[in-house]
Image (spheres, rainbow, N blue to C red):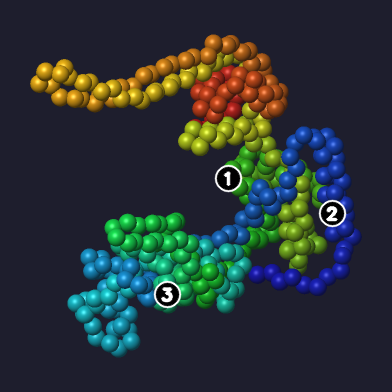
């Protein structure tokens, strides 16, 4: 591991900052309509990562809302715990419903140190009705390698409630899942090696930003800020960066500068339509060819009514209640709108608004455009 040492601002350090600033101003002037972001917002340093932990434990102190005897795992856990304290008990001796078996999940952030605390999510494994008021007994949290990296214990915070009375019940949010805020203590650290043996660092684009053009632009931005050949894009998601000699003993300073390098990401034009919520998101870069769209709104109204059939005075018939329904349909006069090839997103949105399209209509229009080959971009229907 490298340790940061006291140092004075070097000429190269100041020059790098100045180059980054001038490059950002130059790019901003050339591409004012494009979003400018920092490297740290679309990429990470390879080797610097989080790790997931999991475990299981026992929640006690529940007010009769724990696991029933049908779920024997909690009974076995109680018996094992008591045996660990020198008490010999059998499963038949455990009758309480104030206990619940739970699973524990947590995320171990990078660079945490022994003694730091992290949050833990606690979820019921059995048929417990609620974890409100419960206390988690000391439980280990393990990584996929089987080693214990943290231990959790404490009172649960459950963001909900459930009340039952006279056969009725009221529930808000989920009551079988809770949180232990700062409830796990780190017992073992995970080393983070982010400098390769050859003195290079690898910058990895986030999956949603992995793109050959973005990777090339990022490598070019780093080379402009320092020297040509400092960075090389290996593929659509990885940029290899040579650590300058003046930063061999202070790699953290170099990484802090790398994170601030400005770049203009280039992403695929994407449209996301959620028909359930009526949400339509049209990403920058979506283009359409010149097409004619026919759009008509169909409205259906159903009016419920009741008719009473009364038999004759001397007949043997019975009075009958007949429900009826009157259905009316109305369709607006169809209109054909020509959508020309657009160079910007604003024109496309204005054209669709001019048609009077609803989110459901927009989804149908985009599907038809995609099938006709007139939509240039990725279409995602949720």
Expressed as whole percent of the image width and height from the top left, the position of residue 301 reads 43, 22
Q: Which residue is mark 2?
A: 16
Quadrant for residue 142, please give it: bottom left
Q: Residue 123 falls in which quadrant of the image? A: bottom left
Q: Against 243, is 180 above or below?
A: below
Which residue is found at the position 83% from the left and 70% from the top? Answer: 7
**In this orientation, which residue lies closer to the viewer: 141 or 88?**
88
Whether residue 173 is visible, yes or no, is: yes
Q: Earlier in the sequence, mark 2 or mark 1?
A: 2
Quadrant housing the N terminus: bottom right
Q: Which residue is mark 3?
A: 135
Say few, some or many: other residues with alpha carbon within 10 Å of mark 2 (under 14 / 14 to 19 / 20 or more). Answer: many
Q: Is residue 103 above or below residue 23?
A: below
Element on which disc 1 rests = helix
Along the line of sight, the residue nearer the viewer: 150 or 92: 92
Residue at 85% x, 59% y: name it.
Answer: 13
Q: Position of residue 161 (x, y in %)?
A: 43, 62
**Residue tagged 1:** 207
Query: Who is closer to the viewer here, 286 or 145?
Result: 286
Residue at mark 3 to residue at mark 1: CA–CA distance: 39 Å
Q: Indicate the secondary structure of the residue bearing disc 3.
A: strand
First in sequence: mark 3 vs mark 1: 3
Q: In the rendered view, tell whether residue 223 sits above or below residue 107.
A: above
Please rate how many residues cluster around mark 1, counting C-alpha atoms within 10 Å: few if below 14, some from 14 to 19, many from 20: few
């Amino acid at each position: 591991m490298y340790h940061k040492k006291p140092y004075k601002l070097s000429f190269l350090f100041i020059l790098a900052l100045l180059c980054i600033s001038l490059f950002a101003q130059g790019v901003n002037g050339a591409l004012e309509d494009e979003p400018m972001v920092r490297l740290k917002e679309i990429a990470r340093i390879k080797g610097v990562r989080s790790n997931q932990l999991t475990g299981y434990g026992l929640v006690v102190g529940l007010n009769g809302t724990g696991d029933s005897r049908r779920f024997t795992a909690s009974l076995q856990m109680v018996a094992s715990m008591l045996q660990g304290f020198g008490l010999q008990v059998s499963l038949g001796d455990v009758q309480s419903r104030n206990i619940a078996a739970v699973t524990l999940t947590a995320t171990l952030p990078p660079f945490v140190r022994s003694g730091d605390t992290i949050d833990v999510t606690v979820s019921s494994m059995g048929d417990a009705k609620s974890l409100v008021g419960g206390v988690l007994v000391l439980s280990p949290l393990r990584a996929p390698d089987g080693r214990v990296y943290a231990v959790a214990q404490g009172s649960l915070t459950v963001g909900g409630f459930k009340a039952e009375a006279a056969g009725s019940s009221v529930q808000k949010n989920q009551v079988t899942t809770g949180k232990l805020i700062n409830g796990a203590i780190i017992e073992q650290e995970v080393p983070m090696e982010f400098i390769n043996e050859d003195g290079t660092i690898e910058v990895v684009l986030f999956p949603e930003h992995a793109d050959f053009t973005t990777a090339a632009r990022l490598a070019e931005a780093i080379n402009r800020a320092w020297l040509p050949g400092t960075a090389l894009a290996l593929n659509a998601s990885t940029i290899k960066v040579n650590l300058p000699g003046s930063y061999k003993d202070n790699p953290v300073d170099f990484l802090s500068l790398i994170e601030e390098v400005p770049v203009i990401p280039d992403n695929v034009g994407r449209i996301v339509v959620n028909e359930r919520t009526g949400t339509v998101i049209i990403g920058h870069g979506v283009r359409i060819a010149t097409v004619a769209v026919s759009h008509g709104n169909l409205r259906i109204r159903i009016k419920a009514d009741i008719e009473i059939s009364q038999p004759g005075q001397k007949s043997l018939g019975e009075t009958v209640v007949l429900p009826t329904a009157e259905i009316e349909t109305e369709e607006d006069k169809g209109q054909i709108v020509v959508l020309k090839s657009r160079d910007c997103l604003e024109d496309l949105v204005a054209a669709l608004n001019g048609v009077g399209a609803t989110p459901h209509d927009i989804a149908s229009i985009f599907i038809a455009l995609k099938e006709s080959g007139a939509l240039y971009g990725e279409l995602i229907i949720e």
